[in-house]
Image: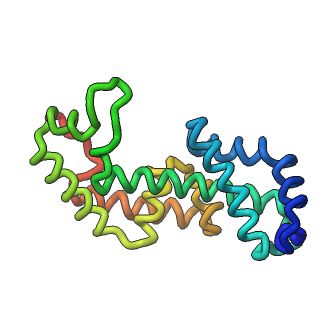
């Protein structure tokens, strides 16, 4: 890592050859999509090149590399989910070829209901504090386990579960978390 930090491209090549399958498997495990995993894995090596100077010797470079890969994959998931939650569904095509997801949603429940539901969700999420919102996002949007969240955040597992439960209680008070039979 110190060689990479000093601009040694051959060191990056060595890391690439040694860890490409390992890092790809981490990214693919998060994203579950081959093309996106390939793209993110390529970007991981760019990030390694750009951030090698921040590596602290003694902690093991394999864990450092794995953390970069996992975080970049999770960031992509968050970005994708955020786009959907914030109205980015208009551009996403359904695999069946029958138009966009937004069009199908509007056919099923009407555009007014979609807007009302979106506004209600945003209001409900505003009831959460930043830490609760982050845990819910990691759990629901990134589909991480409580243990994975605890490891990623460097906080106790009990704290993660407590924040999640507190957030769910707040969301239930706003009408989320309960299935309606309409």
Residue 66 lies left or right of residue 109; in this view the side is: right
- Residue 147 visible in the snapshot: no
Which quadrant does the N terminus fall into? bottom right
Q: Is 79 rendered above or below residue 133?
A: above
Q: Which residue is drawn at 63% across and 41% down?
A: 28
Q: Is residue 175 above or below residue 158?
A: above
Q: Residue 59, how many percent across, how many down?
A: 84, 68
Q: Which of 51 and 116 is in front in this view?
A: 51
Vertical comparison of 27 with 156: above or below? above
Q: Where is residue 69 in the image (x, y as percent from the top left)?
A: 67, 55
177 displayed left or right of 42: left
Residue depicted at x 28% and y 36%: 100
Residue 176 spot, x, y in % from top left: 26, 52
Q: Is the C terminus in the top left, top right, bottom left or bottom right quadrant?
A: top left
Total marks placed: 0
Image position, residue 9 (x, y; %)? 85, 62
Give above or below for 128 relative to 41: below
> Looking at the image, which residue is at 67% across and 49% down?
41
Query: Can the viewer see residue 105?
Result: yes
Taking the image as shown, residue 171 lies to the left or right of residue 39, namely left
Asked if residue 83 lies left or right of residue 24, the reply is left
The residue positioned 90% from the left and 59% from the top of the image is 10
């Amino acid at each position: 890592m110190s060689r990479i930090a000093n601009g040694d491209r051959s060191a990056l090549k060595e890391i690439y050859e040694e860890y490409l399958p390992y890092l790809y498997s981490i990214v693919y495990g998060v994203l579950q999509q081959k093309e996106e995993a390939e793209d993110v894995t390529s970007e991981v090596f760019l990030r390694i090149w750009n951030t090698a100077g921040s590596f602290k010797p003694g902690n093991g470079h394999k864990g450092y590399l794995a953390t970069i890969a996992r975080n970049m994959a999770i960031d992509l998931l968050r970005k994708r989910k955020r786009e959907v939650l914030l109205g980015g569904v208009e551009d996403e095509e359904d695999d069946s070829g029958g138009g966009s997801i937004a069009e199908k949603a509007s056919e099923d429940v009407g555009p007014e209901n979609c807007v009302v539901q979106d506004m209600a969700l945003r209001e409900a999420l505003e009831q959460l504090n930043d830490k609760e919102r982050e845990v819910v996002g990691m759990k629901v949007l990134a589909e991480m386990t409580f243990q994975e969240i605890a490891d990623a955040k460097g906080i106790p597992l009990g704290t993660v579960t407590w924040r999640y439960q507190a957030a769910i209680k707040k969301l239930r008070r706003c009408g989320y978390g309960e299935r309606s039979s309409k």
